[in-house]
Image (cartoon, rainbow, N blue to C red):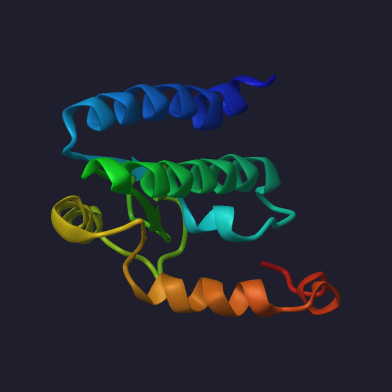
């Protein structure tokens, strides 16, 4: 297993399961996990990263389904493009968000959101459209 998968999936699974066990025993609380819109559909440019984030999102949705019976919640946050030092070299456009805006969405989700929150919300519509493309069309897109 590559260190990338260990960091982006395996370790996140381990702490998510541990945290969900605590929330289940205390019958309250919210598990917030940061995923990515990249997990919504496999793409040639980042398929390993997307697979990690997609698997993580399914795990958190399942944990949310389990925790509801215990009065606790789990939320997967799926940001789109975020203007951070890691993305400093990228050209920015209208789809980019500031970290403060995403942080505000996460704070609101901790209070009442879930189980899936797109940050910002317009990414939910974008990814809904992208997931609907038939494979033969999607394979022609350079995204």
Q: Is residue 29 left or right of residue 88?
A: left
- Identity of the residue drawn at 39% across and 30% down: 16
Q: Residue at x 30, y 26 (%)?
A: 19
Task: Pinpoint residue 73: horizontal percent, then vertical percent.
Answer: 27, 46
Note whether 5 is above or below 56 in the view shown. Answer: above
Quarter holding residue 117: bottom left
| Residue 106, image x, y percentages | 22, 53
Which quadrant of the structure image shows residue 139? bottom right
- Residue 49, compared with residue 131, is above or below; it is above
Q: Residue at x 24, y 53 (%)?
A: 99
- State the image coordinates of residue 56 (x, y, percent, origin top left): 51, 41
Left or right? Give the position of 123 relative to 106: right
Q: Give 95 or 14, whichever is nearer the viewer.
A: 14
Look at the image and tell me in which quarter the C terminus lies: bottom right
Nearest to the observer: residue 101 or residue 41: 41
Query: Residue 79, image x and y in percent?
Result: 38, 57
**Residue at point 80%, 79% (across, down):** 137
Would residue 81 be seen by someone viewing this image from the given angle? Answer: yes
Quadrant of the frame with the N terminus = top right
Quadrant of residue 63 within the rendered picture: top left
Nearer the observer, 71 or 76? 71
Q: Is residue 108 visible?
A: no
Q: Judge from the rendering whether residue 142 lies leftward or rightward of residue 81; answer left or right.
A: right
Location of residue 91 with respect to 140 vertically, above or below: above
Residue at far front of view: 69
Position of 119 with respect to 26 (left or right) is right
How many numbered circles are shown? 0
């Amino acid at each position: 297993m590559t260190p990338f998968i260990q960091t982006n999936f395996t370790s996140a699974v381990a702490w998510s399961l541990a945290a969900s066990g605590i929330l289940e025993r205390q019958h309250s609380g919210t598990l917030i996990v940061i995923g990515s819109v990249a997990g919504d559909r496999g793409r040639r440019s980042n398929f390993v990263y997307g697979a990690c984030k997609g698997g993580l999102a399914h795990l958190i949705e399942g944990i949310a389904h389990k925790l509801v019976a215990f009065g606790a919640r789990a939320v997967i946050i799926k940001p789109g493009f975020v203007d951070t030092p890691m993305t400093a070299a990228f050209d920015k456009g209208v789809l980019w968000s500031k970290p403060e805006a995403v942080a505000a969405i996460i704070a609101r989700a901790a209070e009442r959101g879930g189980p899936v929150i797109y940050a910002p919300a317009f990414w939910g519509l974008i990814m809904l459209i992208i997931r609907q493309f038939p494979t033969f069309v999607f394979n022609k897109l350079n995204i």
